[in-house]
Image (cartoon, rainbow, N blue to C red):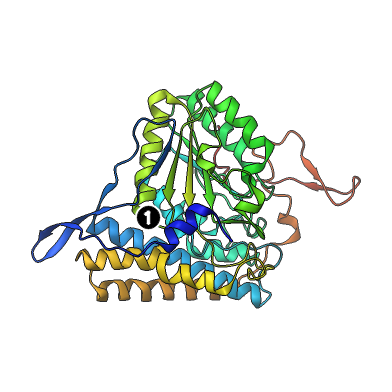
């Protein structure tokens, strides 16, 4: 059983309101759609329920969501082949959250998340081969194969963090650095409904509001914290209200345009000097919590299939833009084929590339090391610290 609000939107009859369309030369250049109502906490007004998307943006958004879906499918297959070891958490089903948020972010904005970040790594500038090769521990990975599934980084992307909820205080620190430095940037600190009960999150709610830090607390509510439904683990499942004195907003996380609109609203809220905001994106994951979890002991296969058929973020967006005449079926088919080729080539590279040598393991641990060596596996076995690549995200 998953959260009440998600159960409500899943069981609603699927409605297709006719979009408002702007045309040029027999094809649409822009279309307008209606989103589900946003739910507000301590806000007098919220984002508009009327959202527009251009033809160019529609193709870009669809491309990114489909790329992440393909990437995660490849990751799941590589894990089953035992070419990916350790933890591996897939984002399939939640693509509209990441792509929608990224579409609203500005160059000076940052994001930090937990361990379900393969898609975010790609969105923040790492090519698919850099993501997949990192998963297989090869040198062409975005951190040379040393980080793996949970520890990927890029410009303005602070990971990939393996400790439940610990990324949220770090995100507030990143946002505080932006305010202190005067960059006008905000930081999106993402966590799940399971991590929402972590005490450290409530601690940084307080300091963020006290100092009006420009942090957007994003609770990606996929209905389950590991194998426990939100209702069984949380006394209150209205996660967007959990900030109490911090304003909040609930958004349908399966609607990419709604997520984009809500994120833009949240960014404007933060940079206007009003301080932080809590945003809950109601979404769903198709896979288990991680690859070691089949995901069927605490929910039925029928439940998963029902969401795939009625609420899938990629399929529903595809139907919208096709119906509006923004794109053609042939265009999307070509795009999907190109993505398949890209991922297939990335998988080949990730399987055949070399691992780094043992001498590179202690490289790039510090940006400004105070000591020339770092500790090895024993206190008397030190390794020489080297710098190979440029450090990113330094403040």
Q: Quadrant of residue 332?
A: bottom left
Query: Residue drawn 19% across and 55% down?
Result: 30
Instruction: Indicate the secondary structure of the residue bearing disc 1.
Output: helix
Rendering coords of residue 238 (x, y %)? 53, 43
The 10 Å Cα crowd at callout 1, few under 14, some 14 to 19, many 20 or more, is: many
Q: Residue furthest top?
A: 210
Q: Quadrant of residue 300?
A: bottom right
When the figure is inspected, residue 164 is found, relative to residue 312, above or below; the finding is above
Rendering coords of residue 176 (x, y %)? 54, 28
When the figure is inspected, residue 269 is found, relative to residue 11, above or below; the finding is above
Query: Residue drawn 56% across and 46% down?
Result: 237
Residue 139 can be seen, yes or no: no
Horizontal side, residue 55 vs residue 142: left or right: left
Rendering coords of residue 91 (x, y %)? 53, 61
Query: Residue drawn 17% across and 58% down?
Result: 29
Q: Quadrant of residue 370?
A: top right
Residue 1 can be seen, yes or no: yes
Q: Which residue is mark 1?
A: 256
Query: Residue drawn 89% across and 49% down?
Result: 378
Nearest the viewer among 347 and 300 is: 300
Nearest the viewer among 200 and 43 is: 43
């Amino acid at each position: 059983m998953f959260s009440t609000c998600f159960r409500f939107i899943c069981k609603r009859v699927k409605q297709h309101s006719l979009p408002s369309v702007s045309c040029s030369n027999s094809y649409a250049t822009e279309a307008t759609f209606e989103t589900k109502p946003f739910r507000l906490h301590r806000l007098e007004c919220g984002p508009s329920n009327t959202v527009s998307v251009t033809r160019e943006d529609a193709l870009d958004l669809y491309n990114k969501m489909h790329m992440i879906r393909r990437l995660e499918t490849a990751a799941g297959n590589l894990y089953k082949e035992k070419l990916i070891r350790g933890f591996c958490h897939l984002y399939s089903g939640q693509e509209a959250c990441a792509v929608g948020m990224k579409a609203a972010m500005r160059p000076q904005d940052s994001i930090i998340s937990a361990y379900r970040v393969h898609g975010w790594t790609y969105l923040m500038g790492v090519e698919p081969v850099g993501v997949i090769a990192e998963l297989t521990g090869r040198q062409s990975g975005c951190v040379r194969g040393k980080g793996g599934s949970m520890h990927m980084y890029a410009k303005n992307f602070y990971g990939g963090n393996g400790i439940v909820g610990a990324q949220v205080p770090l995100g507030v620190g990143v946002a505080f650095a932006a305010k202190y430095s005067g960059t006008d940037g905000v930081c999106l600190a993402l966590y799940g409904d399971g991590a929402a009960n972590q005490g450290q999150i409530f601690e940084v709610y307080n300091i963020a509001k006290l100092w009006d830090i420009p942090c957007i607390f994003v609770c990606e509510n996929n209905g389950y914290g590991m194998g426990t439904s939100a209702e069984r683990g949380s006394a209150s499942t209205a996660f967007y209200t959990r900030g109490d004195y911090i304003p909040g907003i609930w958004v349908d996380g399966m609607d990419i345009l709604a997520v984009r609109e809500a994120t833009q609203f949240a960014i404007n809220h933060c940079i206007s000097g009003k301080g932080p905001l809590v945003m809950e994106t109601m979404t769903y994951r198709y896979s288990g919590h991680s690859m070691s979890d089949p995901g069927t002991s605490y929910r039925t296969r029928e439940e998963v299939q029902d969401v795939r058929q009625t609420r899938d973020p990629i399929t529903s967006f595809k139907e919208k833009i096709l119906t509006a005449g923004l794109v053609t079926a042939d265009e999307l088919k070509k795009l999907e084929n190109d993505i398949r080729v890209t991922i297939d080539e990335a998988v080949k590279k990730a399987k055949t590339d070399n691992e780094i040598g043992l001498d590179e393991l202690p490289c790039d641990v510090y940006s400004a090391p105070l000591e020339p060596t770092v500790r090895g596996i024993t206190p008397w076995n030190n390794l020489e610290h080297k710098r190979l690549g440029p450090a990113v995200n330094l403040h």
